[in-house]
Image (cartoon, grey):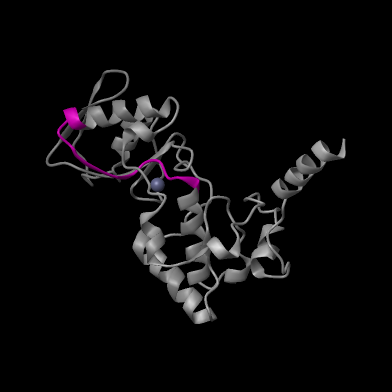
Amino acid sequence: MPRSSKPSAKKTTALRKKPAKPSRTPAARRASRSKSGLAEEAPSAATRELSGGIWVARFKGSKSLDDLKGNFQAMAKAFLQALADAGANVTIAATFRPPERAYLMHFAWEIAHGNISPRDVPAMAGVAIEWVHGNAAASRAAAQEMVDGYGMAFIAALRSRHTEGRAIDMSISWLGRLDIRNAQGQVVAIATTPRTGANPRLHDVGRSYGVVKLVSDPPHWSSDGH
Ligand SMILES: [Zn+2]
């Protein structure tokens, strides 16, 4: 039945269509690179948009405890409730970070610091960014604009407790002595300094709730200290 089989065969071919030729464009080379674990399907060159500050407002990160995942959400809420009950000032800077945002931050940092050529950055499905500008200086300047826009002080990991929804960045401070209830219901009196999230006695209280401090990263607390 050539009449009915022909159109359906055609359809299958159309669906499997590879990115447009010529195949030696940077886009095609990136599309075929898959060992990074990132997407195999690069957005086509025609739909990609140059890197730069405009990307910072996309794939927004969350500051809400409601975007934390699994049992960490309840643990974090309990710890923050205890901090609030004790009169501490808490400002949350970040909770969940979409993996797309982590990708943008990570490679913007790497390009801005000259650690990777923009041509070697693997593509990520759903992120139609073109890292390669007309020349190396322009590529790097655009990446730096993103680093500045994100307010990065360190490189961002592609996968982290933030992309898993199991981390919080927050600043904590209080005046005088902090009397805070731990997860066992005992009131812990913290009269030592600093009166911030860097206080080791507060780390013990956080840990009792399952919210663990990463000491090397001042605002960062997570499910396991990573
Ligand atoms: Zn963090």
Quadrant in the picture for residue 185: top left
Identified at 34% across, 50% down, the residue is 218
Compared to residue 67, the image places residue 217 above or below, namely below
Residue 35, horizontal then vertical, whole percent: 71, 53
Along the viewing direction, whichever of 58 and 204 lies nearer the viewer: 58
**What x and y, as percent, mark residue 203?**
34, 37
Q: Would residue 97 be counted in the magenta stretch? A: yes
- 126 displayed left or right of 72: right
Q: Residue at x 38, y 31 (%)?
A: 207
Q: Is residue 191 visible?
A: yes
Observer-nearest of 209 and 136: 136
Looking at the image, residue 46 lies above or below residue 2: below
Relative to 101, does residue 112 appear above or below in the rendering? below
Say how many tags the image has. Answer: 0
Q: On the picture, is 44 further left or further right than 160?
A: right
Most extreme residue toward the top, as rendered? 185
Q: Residue at x 40, y 53 (%)?
A: 58
Is 98 within the magenta? yes
The quarter of the rendered structure image containing the N terminus is top right
Note whether residue 116 is visible: no
Magenta residues, start to end: 84-99
Q: Which image quadrant is residue 178 in?
A: top left
Q: Nearer the viewer, residue 97 or 133?
A: 133
**The furthest residue to the left:** 176
Of 159 and 126, the residue lying toward us: 126
Residue drawn at x 35%, y 63% as measured from the top left: 149
